[in-house]
Amino acid sequence: MKKRKTYFPQGRAWIELDTQALCQNVTALGALLPEGVTLMPVLKADAYGHGAVLIAKMLNSMGIRAFCVACITEGIELRKHGIKGEILILGYTHPRQFSLLRRYRLTQTVLDHAYALELNRYGRKLAVHVAIDTGMHRLGERAEHRELIRQIFAMKNLEIQGAYTHLCADDTADPEAVSFTGKQAKTFSAVMNHLKRQGYCDVKTHLLASYGVLNYPQLAGDYARVGIALYGVRSSLADLDASAPCLRPVLSLKARITSVKTLFPGESAGYGLCFTAERQIRIATCAIGYADGLPRSLSCGAGSVLINGCRATIIGRICMDQTTVDVTDIPHVSAGGTAIIIGRWRKEEITVYELADKAGTITNEILSRLGERLERVVKD
Ligand SMILES: *Cc1c(COP(=O)(O)O)cnc(C)c1O
């Protein structure tokens, strides 16, 4: 694509995507799984904030041809940008949008028996995967409702290509969780065997998300729906163990330093006067705020950014579009420089785990809330 001369995505605040890291994660996760299992990357929530179209294009060019999204608009967005392969919608689509499923060649999840009736009533063939509820009790027809499930498979307008379930306690070695996961897997395979006996044989299956792949690779069916791990992180640092494969974060988050000034003793910075200088300090304003997804709970000393390889503490309250940091002890800070919010500068690193931990949440939430206003730049 020809870019205009004025195109400069690093002007204000931006995300950098590391192609090599993504490629390495694809390989590492694929290597954990038995032969023949297809990775089905999950691109919901703008690919966990990374930028769904860019990530999908990168994956398409690595040969990946199956994806999951949360909703129909996400699927349409990918198709409009020429993304090839199967796109499975994991969530609800309103009946008034069913025609779009066909127009954009999207595969819909059958959420339960009642929803199957709605899909079937549309009157034309729709490609679907059937969700089976084996214990999470969010989506899926209950596994024990064998007859209702059989009825779904017999509906004449449903072109059933797959069936899946979702594990809800696959992220810990806690014995109760391990036993629950085993039960979920067993329940799912019993349902699939029952269907096979009814003559429904060429149905692809899947049950593993990221933690499933990391902790129970042997349970994989035909696909593995990898989200967070593909982006090179886990939900929290506590989940890292030494035997785990090497996953590299795909995303860095950076912002321009827009202004540097001296603050004299007794002066305050930011809304609500919540930070007051006790001595003379230097402060820098960065062009990123909570509207970009930087959690406001990192205000007033809780969080920091990296400038010239040094940590600069966030002072005052994070604003919607701007954040002020203390750069007193950092040499050579000037407007036009770069602040790293998530990422590495030589040996120093601020990880998304650190942000998530300080904000009292998981990495998935930090990443998926990164704002649309951020530019996204692919690094080879
Ligand atoms: C979000 C989601 C995934 C991906 O989960 P990760 O833990 O990020 O890998 C897989 N399957 C379903 C049904 C999901 O909703």
Image (spheres, rainbow, N blue to C red):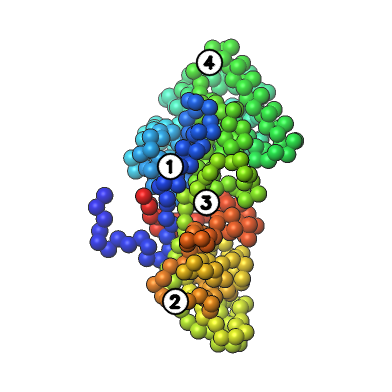
Residue underneath mark 3: 368
> Tag 1: residue type?
Cys
Report the label total: 4
- Label 2 or label 4, whichever lies nearer to me, is 2
Reading the image, the residue beneath label 2 is 332
Residue 370: x percent and y percent? 50, 56
Front residue of 131 and 311: 311
| Dot 2 crowding, Cα within 10 Å, few <14, some 14–19, many 20+ | few
Secondary element at tag 3: helix
Marks 2 and 3, the one that precedes in the sequence: 2
Question: Which of pointers 2 and 1 lies earlier in the amino acid sequence?
Answer: 1
* Badge number at residue 200: 4
Neighbour class for label 1 at 10 Å: few (<14), some, many (≥20)? some
Please name the residue shown 60% across and 48% down the image.
Answer: 235
Q: Nearer the viewer, residue 219 or 196?
A: 219
| Residue type indicated by callout 3 | Ser
Picture layout, residue 125 above or below residue 368: above
CA distance separating discs 3 and 4: 37 Å
Name the amino acid type tagged 2. Answer: His
Q: Quadrant of residue 172?
A: top right
**CB-based contact (under 8 Å), mark 4 and mark 1:** no
